Amino acid sequence: MEQNLKGKNILVTGASRGIGRAVSRAVAGAGANVILTARSEDALSDLKKEILSSGGRAEYITADLESEKEIQDLFSKIGENYSGLDVLINNAGIARAGELVDCPIRDFNMLMNVNLKAVYLCCKHALKMMIAAGSGYIINISSVVGIKGYANQAAYSASKHGVVGLSKALADEVQKYGIRVSLIHPGGVDTDLVKGTRPDLDSSLLLKPEDIAQAVLYLLSLSPRAMVDEIYIRRSLGKPF
């Protein structure tokens, strides 16, 4: 694994906590140069220190992915400070729970901006570097709600279904450039996001962020002969298939 990722520049969005934090630690441990981004500078600074203390390499750039300008600034800084971008891991996301009839349009717009529009824009900016290099990998962290529908999660589900459609179309579009696109659909993961939307779930039975990080490492370890389009990871006690 270290041989595969050593020297690779990997951007992780939503890196400050949960799945993003675990993924950042994992790819740094495998030798990558990790670019951390999220809104909280304090959390990013702490994660950078943790990675550096473990012998890894990491820098951070704060950005609010609801802002198109901040996304543009993020990639401008990456272009100025790095030789290129090898991997983009779109992980940042937010959720809101409640019946559709009670969902304010501002919540719907926020979910679409962060969960879908930001993924679209990050892919667009990353591809400019990846196409020039003739290689690259985009891994989009979706959700089980991107392939199923759940009551009281209509807006969130719509945003994640959008990520799935975007990823499928993009994978076909950029294959000719030597660029890969994969999806990961996590089931219930022990994160603040899940606790906020599904407080009924027993956290001891949920997946851990590290389980999703292992899936990311698996995708990044594939040989050029192999490709996995999507991975659906469920809780072991959940319903099969």
Image (tube, rainbow, N blue to C red):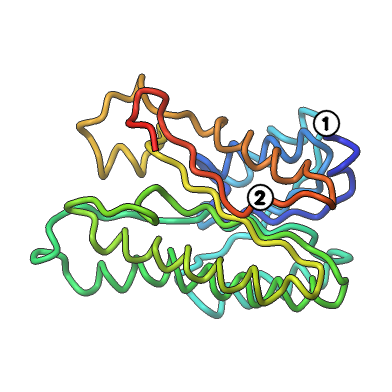
Q: Residue at x 38, y 54 (%)?
A: 147
Assess whether mark 1 and mark 2 are in contact (beta carbons under 8 angstroms). no
Can you give x and y, in whole percent of width and height, for residue 16 in the image? Answer: 54, 45
The N terminus - image quarter: top right
Residue drawn where x is 9% and y is 64% of the image: 102
Residue that carries the numbered disc 1 in the rendered image:
55
Q: Nearer the viewer, residue 176 or 161?
A: 176
Mark 2 and mark 1 lie on one chain; the one further toward the N terminus is 1
Q: Quadrant of residue 211?
A: top right
Q: Which x, y percent locates residue 227? A: 72, 52
Q: Indicate the quadrant where residue 81 lies.
A: bottom right
Q: Residues within 10 Å of mark 1 (few under 14, many from 20)?
A: few
- Type of the residue with mark 2: Val
Q: Give the class, few, some or many, for how many residues have Cα within 10 Å of label 2's Cα (few <14, many ≥20).
A: few
- Residue with the mark numbered 2: 228
Residue 39 sits above or below residue 203 on the image: below
Q: Residue 125 placed where, x, y %?
A: 67, 76
Which residue is outermost to the left? 101
Dot 1 amino acid type? Gly
Question: In the image, which disc is placed on residue 192?
Answer: none
**Secondary structure found at label 2:** loop
